[in-house]
Image: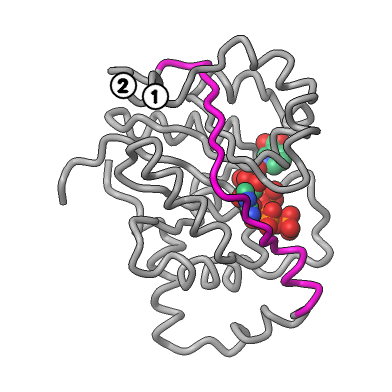
Amino acid sequence: MNAIRRVGLLGGSFNPAHGGHRRISLFARAALELDEVWWLVSPGNPLKPKVGMAPLAARVLSAARQARRAPIRVTAIERQLGTRYTVDTLQALLRRYPKIEFVWLMGSDNLADFHSWRDWRGISRAMPIAVIARPGYDGAAFASPAMAWLRRYRVPLASFVKRSDWSAPALVTLRFDPDERSATAIRRTDPDWAARYAGISPRDQLTFRRIDSAGETPKP
Ligand SMILES: Nc1ncnc2c1ncn2[C@@H]1O[C@H](COP(=O)(O)OP(=O)(O)OP(=O)(O)O)[C@@H](O)[C@H]1O
Ligand SMILES: O=C(O)c1ccc[n+]([C@@H]2O[C@H](COP(=O)([O-])O)[C@@H](O)[C@H]2O)c1
């Protein structure tokens, strides 16, 4: 395997994963010249209710399907690390992969309430952040308390990509064709999506075991 140098981290519930996740990941990879994007399927977003959250196995499998044949690695590494808050996950990943430069990727809906995440300034100091425009949320994101602090660290995309080291805090905003897709909309039209993974095939179980044990992330 060639050395992986720059990786985008997209954390999410993936309840379920959808084409929007894949598309923004591929766009971000191209724009930021990343080697890979890693999807961190969260065992449980600390701010989201457990009700309506499909089992981790089903969410990981839906992510693995969406990530097929793309430079995207799906992992439930937070379960292995025992971390629940992003700040702890990022510190653990930085320790585990000292040679990789990471950037935290998130949609503008997450920036809008970023100030309610645990130690969000600590997250911002851990690695650069790239925010992806999302229909209906950009106004709230730009007016958010976190943005009031982060805007002084804003870097134009072109100069960010050229930087030889990715020091933080740094904020890059990425605008692509807006993508309307959301897991909420899928759950509305297909509330039983996770049931399709209830009797998962032995092959898929193997996939899940491999992903769940973080075997999909490179060895440090
Ligand atoms: N269509 C999209 N455009 C931009 N960012 C997106 C889009 N869909 C998801 N994201 C981002 O992907 C990450 C993971 O999202 P998540 O798994 O919560 O999906 P979601 O569609 O936002 O789910 P839900 O509707 O349940 O909140 C978040 O940073 C989110 O902002
Ligand atoms: O650390 C926190 O306080 C925190 C609060 C809310 C969300 N997060 C993370 O944000 C990511 C996106 O979550 P979600 O549910 O919006 O897809 C996911 O990795 C969560 O663990 C993290």
Circle 2 residues within 10 Å: few <14, some 14–19, many ≥20: few
Residue 142 x %, y %: 74, 26
Q: Is residue 108 left or right of residue 169?
A: right
Residue drawn at (52%, 66%), measured in percent from left and top? 63
* Disc 1: which residue: 158
**Alpha-carbon span between mark 1 and mark 2:** 6 Å
Picture disc at residue 162: 2
Task: Give the camera-side residue of 154 and 74.
Answer: 154
Q: Under tag 1, what secondary structure?
A: helix
Q: Is residue 68 left or right of residue 194?
A: left
Screen quadrant of the C terminus: top left
Up-down relation of residue 86 to residue 180 (above or below): above
Q: Which residues are magenta?
A: 167-189
Task: Give the camera-side residue of 64 and 153.
Answer: 153
Quadrant position of residue 82:
top right
Q: Is residue 32 left or right of residue 65?
A: left
Q: Under tag 2, what secondary structure?
A: helix
- Residue 190 in view in this figure: yes
The amino acid type, in three-letter code, at marker 1 is Ala
